[in-house]
């Protein structure tokens, strides 16, 4: 709709000022929304952070016709899905990123920006590699769909003995997931109420076995949240189970064709830039400038840039950070607000991601396949996400097979990407120590590949990564709106009905954009996933 006339604007503002005279000063931002919430006035939004939370919020905002500037401290975008190319032409990323089909909001975003075809679907089975090349499956392939395919997978997996499978069945059969088959929202209310309990305590208390925890659930928990079942909340794990059980395809997984900056965040940024948004790399927030009082208001961001300090001004400000980022960003004076003080109760967990390249195909099992293992022109092996309970990396993949566009190199073999969890012991260790240890564990898992030579390696250590989804932490996750009228929050740690993940980050970005626009949030559900 066209902007109102000057006379209408003045009259409206006078009315609001009179009505709110006893409630303190109002910002121009709040005045605009209170008087003409549906008007097409173009506002400026400054977004701190270029991960999926900031990018998804930016998409919604530029689509609504607003001016968006994204400020990123690093020399590359993407946050926890960031990636780059080193001097040797090797593609490096912050971690191993797996795309489940229950990522309804992320998939919808990828469809919108033309990136959905950049996903490579894998077989509908989760593979556990035990020491000595012993391969066991959690196989979701079943003619009858959800939830029966999931029940079949958990009740028949050879990763567990029969007693453990029966106890698995007892625990899952008495879980809120059963209620969710007929009453999804009711089941989710029950699951949310289990935040104060660890998954291990809940599972064992409902008849599950400690061996099931050790051999199957711990590797899954490590892969999802970088902590084990004793440290992760029942709400977190059961939420995942609910979403997997809701739709047959939900537990299917995909990997990108290659690096995220080419196949995921790159297309999203192109979409934003085509609609007037701008990304500023190497722009670190040094200070949040604000007008204090009963109703504080941000007036600008002091940014350190390659060209010196500058002040960025906007109508609204969105902090799309991770936990350590937002804790550093928030002014100390704001800790008087309970929402901001609660953020300082949250913790982040460390993780180390190791890349190992070999002169052959590591995951081709069996001594009889030596010729295939050495045939660099014919890639072979396990093309899927892999779990293990017998190594310090809970999950891994051969990216030369799974994401070949950027990770397969002519004349080279496997490129294993291994996630070391828990990461705490590895952060202080040297790169050489980490590489040697991980390489040895790879050879223990795949004895037939012991003759291969390690030709290249890389380690990315993050002392603080995902927020710790420990029991009792849910109340400290903040809403996207804050006590500061023109300051908003996004990030997978903020309040949304999923875990700290790519899907959670995307959801938080949509929720934050809706809060900025003062509109109802429209989130996709699993029903939207095809």
Image (cartoon, rainbow, N blue to C red):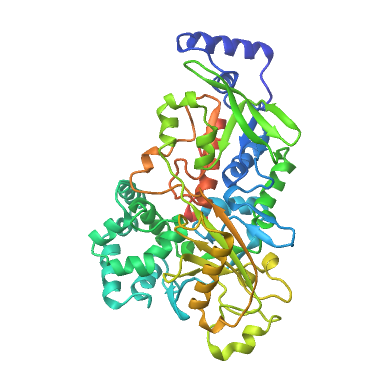
- Is 391 located above or below residue 44 in the figure? below
Residue beneath the point at 53% across and 10% down: 17
Residue at x 54% of width, y 63% of height: 434
Q: Is residue 104 above or below residue 513?
A: below
Q: Where does residue 490 sit, x and y in percent of width and height?
A: 53, 39
**Image quadrant in which you'd find residue 90:** bottom right
Does 7 sit left or right of 365 as displayed? right
Instruction: Point out residue 240 in the picture as x, y percentages from the top left corner.
Output: 41, 56
Q: Position of residue 340 (x, y in %)?
A: 45, 31
Residue at 50% x, 52% y is 501
Q: As rendered, which of 449 and 385 lies closer to the eye?
A: 449
Q: Position of residue 516 (x, y in %)?
A: 56, 31
Question: Which one is in front, 432 or 154?
Answer: 432
Report whether residue 404 is seen. Answer: yes
* Label tally: 0
Relative to 178, residue 494 above or below: above
In the rendered image, which quarter contains the N terminus?
Answer: top right
Depth check, front residue: 527 or 447 = 447
Q: Quadrant of the C terminus?
A: bottom right
Q: Is residue 99 left or right of residue 197?
A: right
Residue at the farthest right position: 307
Q: Vertical placement of 172 versus 236: above or below? A: below
Q: Is residue 50 left or right of residue 343?
A: right
Residue positioned most to the bottom: 368
Residue closer to the observer: 364 or 430: 430
Residue 522 visible (yes or no): no
């Amino acid at each position: 709709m066209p902007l109102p006339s000057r006379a209408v604007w003045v009259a409206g503002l006078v009315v609001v000022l009179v009505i709110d005279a006893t409630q303190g000063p109002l910002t121009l931002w709040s005045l605009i929304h209170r008087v003409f919430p549906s008007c097409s006035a173009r506002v400026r939004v400054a977004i701190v952070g270029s991960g999926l939370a900031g990018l998804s919020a930016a998409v919604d905002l530029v689509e609504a016709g607003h001016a968006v500037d994204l400020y990123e401290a690093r020399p590359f975008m993407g946050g926890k899905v960031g990636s780059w190319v080193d001097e040797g032409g090797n593609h490096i990323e912050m971690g191993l990123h797996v795309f489940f089909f229950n990522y309804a909001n992320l998939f919808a975003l990828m469809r919108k920006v033309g990136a959905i075809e950049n996903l490579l679907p894998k077989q509908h089975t989760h593979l556990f590699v035990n020491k000595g090349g012993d391969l066991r499956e959690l196989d979701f392939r079943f003619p009858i769909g959800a939830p029966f395919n999931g029940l079949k997978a958990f009740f028949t997996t050879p990763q567990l003995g029969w007693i453990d499978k029966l106890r698995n069945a007892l625990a899952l059969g008495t879980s809120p997931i059963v209620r969710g088959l007929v009453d999804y929202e009711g089941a989710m209310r029950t699951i949310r109420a289990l935040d104060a309990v660890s998954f291990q305590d809940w599972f064992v208390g409902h008849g599950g076995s400690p061996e099931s925890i050790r051999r199957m659930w711990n590797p899954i928990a490590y892969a999802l949240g970088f902590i084990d079942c004793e440290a992760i909340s029942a709400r977190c794990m059961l939420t995942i189970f609910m979403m997997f059980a809701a739709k047959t395809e939900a537990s299917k997984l995909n990997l990108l064709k290659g690096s995220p900056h080419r196949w995921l965040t790159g297309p999203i940024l192109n979409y934003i830039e085509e609609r007037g948004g701008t990304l500023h790399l190497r722009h670190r927030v040094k200070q949040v400038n604000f007008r204090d009082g009963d109703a504080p208001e941000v007036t600008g961001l002091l940014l350190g840039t390659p060209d010196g300090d500058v002040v960025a001004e906007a109508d609204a400000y969105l902090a799309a950070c991770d936990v350590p980022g937002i804790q550093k960003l928030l002014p100390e004076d704001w800790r008087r607000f309970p929402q901001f003080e609660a953020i300082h109760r949250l913790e982040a967990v460390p993780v180390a991601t190791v890349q190992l390249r070999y002169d052959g195909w590591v995951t081709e099992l069996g001594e009889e396949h030596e010729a295939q293992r050495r045939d660099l022109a014919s890639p072979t092996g396990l093309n899927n996400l892999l779990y293990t309970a017998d190594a310090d990396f809970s999950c891994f993949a051969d990216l030369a097979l799974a994401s070949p566009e950027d990770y397969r190199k002519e004349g080279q073999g496997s490129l294993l990407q291994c996630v070391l969890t828990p990461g705490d012991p590895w952060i202080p260790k040297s790169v050489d120590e980490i590489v040697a240890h991980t390489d040895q564990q790879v050879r223990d898992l795949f004895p037939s590949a012991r003759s291969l030579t390690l030709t290249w390696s890389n380690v990315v250590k993050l002392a603080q990564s995902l927020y710790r989804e420990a029991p009792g932490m849910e109340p400290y996750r903040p809403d996207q709106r804050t006590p500061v009228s023109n300051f908003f929050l996004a990030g997978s740690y903020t309040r949304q009905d999923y875990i700290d993940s790519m899907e959670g980050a995307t959801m938080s970005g949509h929720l934050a954009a809706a809060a900025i626009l003062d509109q109802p949030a429209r989130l996709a559900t699993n029903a939207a996933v095809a």
